Amino acid sequence: MRRLALTLLLVAPVARAQDEEPTGDVPSPTSPLTVTGYVDVGFAKAQGNGTSFAADDGRLPADYGVDTFAPAVNSRGDVASTDAEGRFTNGFLPRSMGIGSRPSAFINTVSVDARYDAPSTPVMVFSRLQALPRLHDTRFLVEQAFGRIVPFDSQEFALSVGKFDSVFGVEYLENQANLRTGITPSLVARYTTGTPVGAKAFYRVQLAPFWSAFSLNVAATNAPAFVDSLQGPEISLTGRPVASGRLGYELNLPRVQVKLGGSAMAGPRNDQGDPEAGARALGADARLYVAGISLTGEYVQVDQDPGTAADKSTGLGTQTVASGFHTRGFYVIAAYDLPWRGRVLRKATLYLRGEQRHAWFEGSEALTVRRLTAGARLDLWENLALKGEYLANREREGAPTVPNDVVAASAIFSF
């Protein structure tokens, strides 16, 4: 993993030198084993009761009529609360920090990466272990665990097997809090930033006379690249793989970088056991880096067929009914690196993100939500990042208007 209208609202991450196979953002080590990581300490205050549920909304399931992911408080997309006050929900819910409307400090993530480069061989092994302290659901997570082989010295070609970053789109490049410019993920990140289990291949060819390169990233996995609160990646519930991939182009001029990509995904949905219940996704992304300014935009379209009842025998899949589902969404990010540098302050970044998500479950009313996020990041020394942002959530269609804006802050200590 490497450091990657409505109107033009939105904001881009820090510029990446190139689209490369994710490896946990660990530099080439001088010894075979390298251990790195970070601690993400957060703070948040959400409006209302910390959810998107309205007290007088009697529609059921309650989670079909609102965007439960909107009041996010950290880089994992965990929200302030998912308390539906006793109303039935079908399980399409994010993870919750359980703070409700109370302002609170908390530990978002304790992350440890271990990378081993086998001497004199083209083999690398990478693992990312994370602790997620929560009020009622503290988890210890294997976020990534894969082996990679680079068989040819003369080619940018790599094969990976295990649990790894998605190959769909580009937002996965900022999955981790220490890499993400801001604090929270986009409204469509839940469909593209999971860490599936399977095999993938990456190939990149450079056209030096044209300052250009093409890249191809493809994968066959147990599940779509949805976050694990929606579909578990650990095993296949259907016995059939999900295919996904991204074709990218980049123009790397001395002072300007342009990167374009198209993504696709197809296979069975992995929250139920019927292999004929399919999931499909299409995406397009574009990035521009020039004079300290970065602009990033991504469009995502997802369609899921109705499935059978979720498979409870494995403990995966929280849904009672795997309803048919459709969504179209996008985000645009703009970021500017201020020209301030010093011995302590290494970088200061202002960013703005605008986004929209239009979605509907079959048989339920469609809903449209929009969000405008503004924030700043300060990088101090080499191992401390301070962030603060404000999320302005707006229900535009199909969902009741509720106060669910969020103020969030984060301090990330890296080692």
Image (cartoon, rainbow, N blue to C red):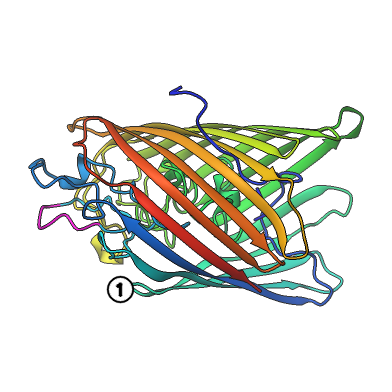
- Identify the image quadrant of residue 277: top left
- On whether residue 86 falls in the magenta region, the answer is yes
Q: Is mark 1 on a helix, strand or loop?
A: loop
Residue 96 visible in the displayed image: yes
Q: Nearer the viewer, residue 348 or 206?
A: 348
Quadrant occupied by the N terminus: bottom right
Residue drawn at x 28%, y 74% is: 136
Taking 380 as reference, is 27 left or right?
A: right
Q: Which of 277 and 10 is in front in this view?
A: 10
Majority secondary structure in the magenta region: loop
Residue drawn at x 17%, y 51% is: 89
Question: What is the total number of numbered labels drawn onto the structure image?
Answer: 1
The x and y percentages for residue 126 are 65, 68
Residue 163 visible in the displayed image: no
Taking 347 as reference, is 364 left or right?
A: left
Q: Give the range drawn in magenta.
A: 82-88
- Identify the image quadrant of residue 204: top right
Q: Which residue lies furthest to the right in this view?
A: 209
Q: Residues within 10 Å of mark 1 (few under 14, many from 20)?
A: few
The x and y percentages for residue 304 are 34, 37
| Relative vertical location of residue 92 with respect to residue 247 in this rendering, above or below | below
Taking 9 as reference, is 48 left or right?
A: left
Disc 1 residue type? Answer: Leu
- On whether residue 378 falls in the magenta region, the answer is no
The x and y percentages for residue 154 are 89, 49
| Relative vertical location of residue 374 with respect to residue 311 in this rendering, above or below | above
From the image, tell me which residue sits under label 1: 135
Quadrant occupied by the C terminus: bottom right
The x and y percentages for residue 54 are 15, 45
| Relative vertical location of residue 134 with respect to residue 328 in this rendering, above or below | below
Taking 320 as reference, is 387 left or right?
A: right
